[in-house]
Image: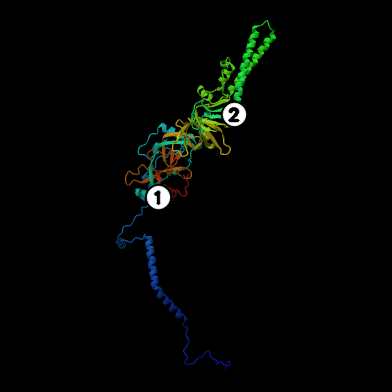
Amino acid sequence: MSQSVIGRPSVNPDTSAPDSPAPTDQRPHGLVWKLGRWFLDGLPTIIVMSVLVAIGYYGHTHHWKIPTFAEFTGQAKPVVKDWCEEHGVPESKCVICNPDLMPAGPDYGWCTEHGVNNCPLHHPDVAELKKTPVISAATMQQADRALALRERPDNNAACKVYQKRIQFASNEAVQQAGVDVELVDREPVTEWVSGTGEIRYDPTRLANLSARVPGTAWRVLKNVGDRVQEGDILAVVDAAEVGRLKSDLVKAIVAENLARKNFERLNGLRGSVPGKDILAAEAILAKEEAEVLSVEQSLANLGLSVDVASIANLNKQAMIDRLRFLGFPEKLAEQYRSQTASANLIPVRSSMNGVVTERNVVSSEVVTPERTLFEVADPSWMWLILNVPLEEASLIQVGQQVRFQPNGSRKEITGNLSWISTAADKQTRMVKVRAEIDNADGQLRDETFGAGRIILRQEKQAVVIPRSAVHWEGCCQVVFVRNKHYFDSPESPKVFQLRNVRTGFVNGDRVEIIAGLLPGEVVVTQGSDVLRAQLLKNSLGEGCCAE
């Protein structure tokens, strides 16, 4: 008999009440039902998403084009792909992939003389021209002059980029890419060395005038801007030293006359008087003559020349009257005779023809020899002083033409180089040069600043193109030249050939082409970035100098 736990009836596991139903597990059947219900609820969404994915895949693979009826019915003809993805033109017309469509011209290689490949100067047949031109001796000499003058940008002889060609699908594609072209032509070219400078008076035509002895300005006769001739009196100075010298001259002349009379008297009594008296009289005469000469020379040093012989026989008063206005013209002497009794007057004269450019004195002002009273300049010829960079000084020579444009002026003046300094400035490292400028019209002003150019070379017929047409491709300078068969027919390949060039003088937006192009060819000037991008795409992995 089984024992039961108190408070809990015992249950026989093998038996159960006859009226109780048998227990069953419902979990597996509930999960299937839930999954089925979820699938049925999400079935419309799954169908819609599947349709969208199918449409997207079809649109992507068929470039979103609606198929034609023929394609639905299976009657469409198969499409043949004819497009060169690499060069952006139809495969059947790609001259790069099919060189036989447009055979490349002869490759003459590197020109050591002019520094380009396929040099048109030696091989004009490489030019993109319908007719092969004739290269004259003058053209070759012009290139030689340009290369000999100074260092020019170099190209790498190993560069093979000149063998490349860029093709467009059509002329409309060229226009849509913004590509513009220009005809290569000849223009005058002037090459120069530039420098800043100033106009100055020619020092050999400039005079600073002052009184030769201390005194007082008695009269000032000329003003700034007055034209004067050599010898004209600019001012009159009252100087006591002048009066003393004139007095000394009178005394010396009188003493000389007395000594001469005494000597002549004793010499006439030779034999009757002691010889030593004659010798003494002769010595006194020589001394007085020397004194006259000394005073005469002192007056001459002051610019007051006197003819002693013409006044030696005059009496003392007459001599004083003659010397009173020594150095003055008769007309001015008569005018001053009534204005003063002084014998101290000395004129300040102009030493050259010119214009009074400075006046630094007024009447009654004390003056000294150290002080400049007037500046007189001859402005008919001026000096142009230019400062040239030291590294370009070797290019200039005496005799070369100089052109100078003063600040604020539209007029350009010309002259010729007359001097080149043998030293460079210690601070600026510039070399001074000088040119003489004709200023007959008087339009130039002293100490006028401006910009100058020293002309190195002038060519009347040089090949010149826009700077935008020239590109640096890592090891050489290139231009894009339009093929000569570009317009032979609408179906002609639209091809641009690369050409390396040797550039010369650059002036603004124009650059001289020494070698690499000939007049009549057509080069790309605008939109060349499109061509360069295509060139880069075609040359990936090759490098500029790839074989």
Q: Secondary structure at mark 2?
A: strand
Mark 1 to mark 2 CA distance (whole Å): 96 Å
Q: Is residue 120 visible?
A: no
Question: Badge 1, how many Cα within 10 Å: few under 14, some, many 20+?
Answer: many
Q: How is the rendered protein coloured?
A: rainbow
Q: Report the amino acid beneath label 1.
A: His
Q: Which residue is mark 2?
A: 215
Q: Which mark is residue 292?
A: none
Q: Quadrant of residue 310?
A: top right
- The residue singled out by tag 1 in the image is 87
Q: Which is nearer the eye, 496 or 192?
A: 192
Decide which of 315, 460 is in the foreground and name it: 315
Which residue sits at x=31%, y=57%?
A: 77
Q: Is residue 43 above or below residue 346?
A: below
* Image quadrant assignment for residue 65: bottom left
Residue 519 shows in this picture: yes
Residue 538: x and y in percent read 43, 49
Question: Residue 303: x and y, percent?
Answer: 56, 23
**Dot 1 or dot 2, earlier in sequence:** 1
Front position in the image: 62 or 511: 511
Q: Amino acid at mark 2?
A: Gly
> How many residues crowd mark 2 within 10 Å: few (<14), some (14–19), many (20+)?
many
Give above or below for 205 relative to 264.
Answer: below
